[in-house]
Image (cartoon, rainbow, N blue to C red):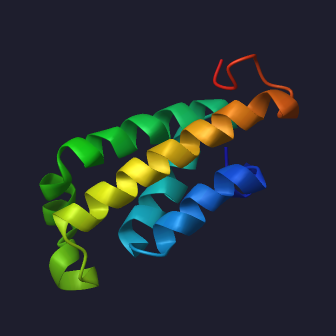
Amino acid sequence: MDSDDLTDMAWDVIVQAAQLSDALKVDLGDMSGEYVTEDDWLRGVRGFLREIAETPEEYVELWDLEEEEGVTAIMISVLAVALASQVEKVALAAPAAGRGPTGME
């Protein structure tokens, strides 16, 4: 799947990430190529964001975010939690888009 295939609600997750971190924006966009459907992408993104929230220092160090973007571990953790919540909202709205009852089936 290409990131251009995402619904507006799903694409907004990438847009929100871009407001703090170009690296996270790129990671989320690149992840779309790993999945066949938006549902799969949402599940993958949710897991990825949870990992970042649990170990934000690793993500910041991986991309040298403090030096390159002025983003700290606390900042990326807060963003990851907020984006994971947004992913849940997209998934809940998904039945209206013809997905399963949970939006992530």
- The image position of residue 57, as x and y in percent, is 13, 57
Q: Is residue 14 visible?
A: yes
Location of residue 65 (image quadrant) = bottom left
In the displayed structure image, the side of residue 51 where residue 20 appears, left or right: right
In the displayed structure image, the side of residue 79 where residue 10 appears, left or right: right
- The image position of residue 63, as x and y in percent, is 22, 67
Location of residue 24 (image quadrant) = bottom left
- The image position of residue 68, as x and y in percent, is 23, 83
From what the image shows, is residue 13 above or below residue 63? above
Q: Residue at x 29, y 62 (%)?
A: 76
Query: Which one is nearer the viewer's eye here, 58 or 77?
Result: 77
**Total count of labels:** 0
From what the image shows, is residue 29 above or below residue 98? below
Q: Residue at x 47, y 65 (%)?
A: 17
From what the image shows, is residue 95 above or below residue 28? above
- In which quadrant is the C terminus drawn? top right
- In which quadrant is the N terminus drawn? top right
Q: Residue at x 54, y 57 (%)?
A: 29
In the displayed structure image, the side of residue 13 where residue 20 appears, left or right: left
Q: Residue at x 16, y 83 (%)?
A: 67
- The image position of residue 36, as x and y in percent, is 65, 33
Q: Is residue 41 visible?
A: no
Query: Which one is nearer the viewer's eye here, 40 or 19?
Result: 19
